[in-house]
Amino acid sequence: KILIIGACGQIGTELTMALREKVGNQNVIASDIREGSPELMASGPFEVADATNFEQIQDLVIQYEIDEVYLMAAMLSATAEKFPMKGWALNMNSLFHVLNLAKDKKVSKVFWPSSIAVFGPTTPKKDTPQTTIMEPSTVYGISKQAGERWCEYYHNKFGVDVRSIRYPGLISYKTLPGGGTTDYAVEIYHEALKNKKYTSFLKEDTELPMMFMDDAIRATISLMEAPAENVKIRSSYNLAALNFTPATLTKAIQKHIPEFEIDYAPDFRQAIADSWPSSIDDSRAREDWGWQHEFDIDRMTEEMLEGIKEVHHV
Ligand code: VAH
């Protein structure tokens, strides 16, 4: 049985639907601090739980005889800058609860998401290597770097089978992201369809590593299904698909909506984006467990525009 904590989030929602498709609805228990989309709620067991409350998580693990936990609950980069201590508490305490349940053999496998936010202003920005200087300058990035250290420690010290991916900015249409710095790349599609114009909170030449959600979900499941001996990195794997700027994304959208216009009004999130890499070297994920992205910017743009029309009736 699988427990997904944070099942109503941007990744959690699609991960829940994909895993239910794969292993059967009743074998995937979705949990979050509040209820989720009607589609998610209708598709299988759901439990309201606080990811920072050990007893609540332990009760779910025992009650449903959980084998694997995907811990997708977190406070993202922009919001965590507004509430540093809440962001640290949520991102770290939830991880300790799940790692300790695994250490006590109450669960056999853990997935925990890291992020390109673990890299900072002193990290090489182009083709950022798997192992390199990491001085994250955001609360979220600090929590992800610390989390990676703890995952590797619990694996090496207690044999915990925890696996992790440093997600780039993720782009999807089934749920709106909350509080991220890469969210402009989701909002822009909704605005292009609704208003044919968008004001970007990042400058036009801000290049960031990005990925369509379908690729991210497939990578997550592929890593979790890989033989343990192939998962040689137990901090977190670099993962990449594409990297683009708001200007490049605008051109991809204008192929479908020629009259779409963008203007730029950078806000506090520009400094966060400026501290992150512009492209990632994910050769270790390709070598160790056969990662290969499938969506380029044009295919992603088609999927996003079609998906938004369908799901949000624009
Ligand atoms: C954020 N979408 O913007 C997340 C992600 C790399 C970006 O961590 O905070």
Image (cartoon, rainbow, N blue to C red):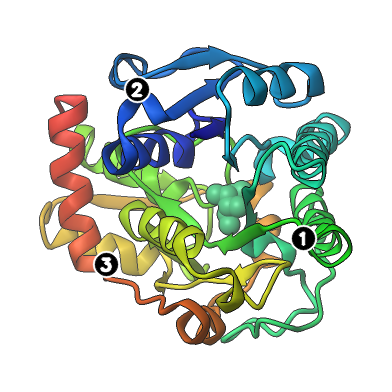
- The mark that comes first in sequence, 2 or 1, is 2
Q: Please give left or right for residue 302 compared with residue 94 in the image.
A: left
Residue under pointer 2: 40
| Along the line of sight, the residue nearer the viewer: 4 or 190 | 4
Taking 262 as reference, is 195 above or below it? above
| Residue at point 31%, 54% (across, down) | 214
Q: Please give left or right for residue 56 compared with residue 312 in the image.
A: right
| Along the line of sight, the residue nearer the viewer: 134 or 216 | 216
- The mark that comes first in sequence, 3 or 2, is 2
Taking 161 as reference, is 58 above or below it? above
Q: Amino acid at mark 3?
A: Phe
Q: Quadrant of the C terminus?
A: top left
- Element at badge 1? helix
Q: Marks 1 and 2: in contact by CB < 8 Å?
A: no
Can residue 165 be seen here? The reply is yes
Q: Amino acid at mark 1?
A: Glu
- Tell me where residue 66 appears, x and y as whole percent: 58, 32
- The mark that comes first in sequence, 1 or 3, is 1
- Element at badge 2? helix
- Counting every numbered tag in the picture gives 3
Q: Amino acid at mark 2?
A: Leu
| Residue 251, quarter of the rendered image | bottom left
- Tell me where residue 305 appears, x and y as whole percent: 18, 46
| Residue at point 66%, 22% (across, down) | 62
| Residue at point 64%, 16% (across, down) | 49
Kindly report the distance in space between the C-alpha atoms of the residues bearing marks 3 and 2: 25 Å
Residue under pointer 1: 148
Residue under pointer 3: 295
Crowd tier of the residue under label 3, counting other residues whose Cα lies within 10 Å: few below 14, some 14–19, many 20 or above: some
Q: Please give left or right for residue 255 compared with residue 68 in the image.
A: left
- Tell me where residue 34 appears, x and y as whole percent: 55, 13
